[in-house]
Image: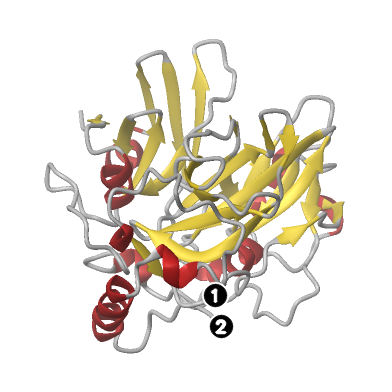
Amino acid sequence: MRRHLRIFPLLTALITVFVTSANANPQRWKSEWPSTDFSRSSVADWSEIMSGGPPKDGIPALNNPKFHNASSETRISPREPVITLEIKGQPPRAYPIRYLTWHEIVNDKVGGIPVAVTFCPLCNSGLVFDRRVRGKLRTFGVSGKLRNSDMVMFDRETESWWQQAIGTGIVGRHQGDVLKQLPSWMESWQQFKARNPQGLVMDQPDFPRAYGRNPYVSYDSSARPFLYNGELPPHGIAPLMRVVRVGKRAWPMARLNKETVVKEVGLVISWASGQASALDTGQIGKGKDVGSIRVRDAVGRDVPHDVMFAFAFHAFFPNGIWMIQ
């Protein structure tokens, strides 16, 4: 079961919003979430939590994926996006969006560091987190719920709910805890492979999915985001314009692909063409070129960041700083 955006999207959204708002009550969720402590929450209004369509684990997260050498990969087309993770002393790893589109979370371990590689298609948010919370290992799954159109994750050990775009516990025992974000970035498969011919790429999962297909056709050309009732971004920025978020600052992609390199607030943000949008055409590898971003500090170290849609940045950082010039 998937979130469907292609058939009567406005009608679907209106019906879902109405039904979800009417049923936004923790007492109704207890049968599905018996171990979640709903008395601990930072959610101001339960109607902020909406069903994305699938139930708990309806989108199956992946655990302990297999990898193979980048040089032997033949299924991924050159412009397809991957999330790149480089941990010192370990071969670089690529997590293809063709798989994350259908699974959204990968629980992995790299060089002794347990990581959660996450991707929310509705916000274009791709983040990697350390899975240790207060010294305890956590394993993450997809709750099937959305807040501000962003995936709500949960950990299997406590069934606390986590907001993917900010890596923060919002409901349950871990309410208020923050996951450590690790430096990672999205780039094309061709860019990863050229730089890391001996790197590793995640193997295709053993699930009956149309890997390489995009179930969110033309989503990033939409006038409004799906299942979102919040304010739209300021400064005339389109809701589904990609922005580069570092902390509470956001650089619109329109500025970055024009200037290609921006040096501000101790950061060097570079843009390079060659990465296809995963949320455009039916075949991911044929999507429009949205470019690849790399964020480093003044001495060249990679900096944790995100490339998300403008509406999501405004929703989670309403007082954020827009770096528009």
Tell me which label, 1 or 2, sits earlier in the chain: 2
Coordinates of residue 264 in the picture (x, y in percent) = 34, 18
Q: Is residue 26 left or right of residue 285?
A: left
Q: Is residue 194 above or below residue 288?
A: above
Q: Residue at x 31, y 80 (%)?
A: 19
Q: Residue at x 57, y 64 (%)?
A: 33
**Residue 42, image quadrant:** top left
Front residue of this view, candidates 202 and 42: 42
Q: Which residue occupies 75% across, 44% down?
A: 93
Circle 2 crowding by C-alpha within 10 Å: few under 14, some 14–19, many from 20? few
Considering the image in quadrants, where does the N terminus appear? Answer: bottom right
What's under tag 1, amino acid-wise?
A: Pro
Judging depth in this view, the residue of 125 and 113 nearest the camera is 113
Q: Is residue 171 left or right of residue 203?
A: left
Is the residue under label 2 in contact with that under label 1 (CB below 8 Å)? Answer: yes
Residue 96 visible? The answer is no
Closer to the camera: disc 1 or disc 2?
Answer: 1
The extreme top residue here reads: 299
Mark 2: amino acid: Met
| Residue 31 percent across, percent down from the top left | 56, 72
Q: How many residues crowd mark 1 within 10 Å: few (<14), some (14–19), many (20+)?
A: some
Q: Secondary structure at mark 2?
A: loop
Quadrant of the image for the C terminus?
top left
Which residue has dot 1 on it?
Answer: 55
Question: Nearest the camera: 146 or 127?
Answer: 146
Q: Which numbered marker is on residue 213?
A: none
Q: Residue 1 has which mark?
A: 2
